[in-house]
């Protein structure tokens, strides 16, 4: 009975749900929507991420190799990153997983791994870009993606981050449309974007890179949404949310200092601040 109980406890880890949802999205995109995902890039991203995680585990002296987080990062990169160069795909995975071990503060990642990899490659090379419209704009597709993401968020106990971001960002989009006299179909179309939904449900909600307190997470989501709107509609730069997240990430330690909360641990979601569990990367 104890063995069965331990196995059940393992599968309460929300990362299993994240992997299942992201894998389903990849398969659906390739089979039904004919995404421009090259199998060579996908295989390279996954294998490189796991290899870097393994090397990092050895160098950090962690008790065991945990493949779950690098798998989630790999699937996110596979869905969003587009490049014709296999070397760049490998570099993205190495940057993403390497950042978890090299860029840390008070036991937490400073940047979301997939986010820092995407931004780094977009700024460093014109041969890497983010595929934003790949999911299509059909309302049913957006709704399905949102529901799957919400399931993951509920398991990860970080739903308020995404809810706050989407509400604030959507309010700005609709407010802009009203101000300009545009039809409301325009902001509706802007919200029915695969990259935006993946960002909202699987990137900004990352419990290892968001503030520890619920109030802090709402504040953080507000900051990201505001900066994203400015980048996208004031400076007219694409990928506003992705750029906004990396700009806002350094604010998390300050928010945690002012609004103290419990540090999230995958195996123990309610672990108290200061009582961190070694080996959680």
Image (cartoon, rainbow, N blue to C red):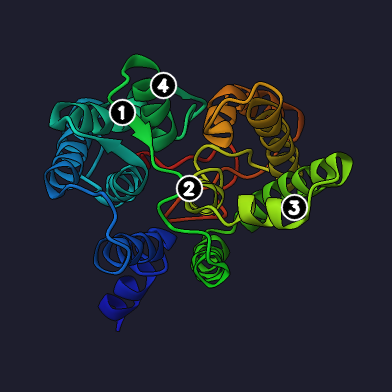
Does 28 sit left or right of 273 as displayed? left
- How far is the residue under mark 2 from the one under mark 3? 17 Å
N-term mark: 3 or 1: 1
Position of 254 relative to 80 (above/below): above
Of the 4 image quadrants, the one containing the C terminus is top left
In percent of the image, x 40 and y 60: which residue is there?
Answer: 18
N-term mark: 2 or 3: 3
Q: Position of residue 111 (x, y in %)?
A: 47, 29
Of the 4 image quadrants, the one containing the N terminus is bottom left
Asked whether residue 61 appears in the rendered view, the answer is no
In percent of the image, x 49 and y 44: which residue is there?
Answer: 203
Pair 3/1: label in front: 1
Numbered circle sitting on residue 128: 1
- How far is the residue under mark 2 from the one under mark 1? 15 Å
- How far is the residue under mark 2 from the one under mark 4? 25 Å
Pair 2/4: label in front: 2
N-term mark: 2 or 4: 4
Q: Position of residue 185 (x, y in %)?
A: 71, 58
N-term mark: 4 or 1: 4
N-term mark: 4 or 3: 4
The residue at which mark 3 appears reads as 167
Does 200 sit left or right of 259 as displayed? left
- Of the pair 235 and 150, the residue shown nearer to us: 235
Location of residue 273 (image quadrant): top right
Asked whether residue 101 appears in the rendered view, the answer is yes
- How far is the residue under mark 3 from the one under mark 1? 30 Å
| SS at mark 2 in the image | helix
The residue at which mark 2 appears reads as 195
- How far is the residue under mark 4 from the one under mark 1? 23 Å
The residue at which mark 4 appears reads as 103
| SS at mark 1 in the image | strand
């Amino acid at each position: 009975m104890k063995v069965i109980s331990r196995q059940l406890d393992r599968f309460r880890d929300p990362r299993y749900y994240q992997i299942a949802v992201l894998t389903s999205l990849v398969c659906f995109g390739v089979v039904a929507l004919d995404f421009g995902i090259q199998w060579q890039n996908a295989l390279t991203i996954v294998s490189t991420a796991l290899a870097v995680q393994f090397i990092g585990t050895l160098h950090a002296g962690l008790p065991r190799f945990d493949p779950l987080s690098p798998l989630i990062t790999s699937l996110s990169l596979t869905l969003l990153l587009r490049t014709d160069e296999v070397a760049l795909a490998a570099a993205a995975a190495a940057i993403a997983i390497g950042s978890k071990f090299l860029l840390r503060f008070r036991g937490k990642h400073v940047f979301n791994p997939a986010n820092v990899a995407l931004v780094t490659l977009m700024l460093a090379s014109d041969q890497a870009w983010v595929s934003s419209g790949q999911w299509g704009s059909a309302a049913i597709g957006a709704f399905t993606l949102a529901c799957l993401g919400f399931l993951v968020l509920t398991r990860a106990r970080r739903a308020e981050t995404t809810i706050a971001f989407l509400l604030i960002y959507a309010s700005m989009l609709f407010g802009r449309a009203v101000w300009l006299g545009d039809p409301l179909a325009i902001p509706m179309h802007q919200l029915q974007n695969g990259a935006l939904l993946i960002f909202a449900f699987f990137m900004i909600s990352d419990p290892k890179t968001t503030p520890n307190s619920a109030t802090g997470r709402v504040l953080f989501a507000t900051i990201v949404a505001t900066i994203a709107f400015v980048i996208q509609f004031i400076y007219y730069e694409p990928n506003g949310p992705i750029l906004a997240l990396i700009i806002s990430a350094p604010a998390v330690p300050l928010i945690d200092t002012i609004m103290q909360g419990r540090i999230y641990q995958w195996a123990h979601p309610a672990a108290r601040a200061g009582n961190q569990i070694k080996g959680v990367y």
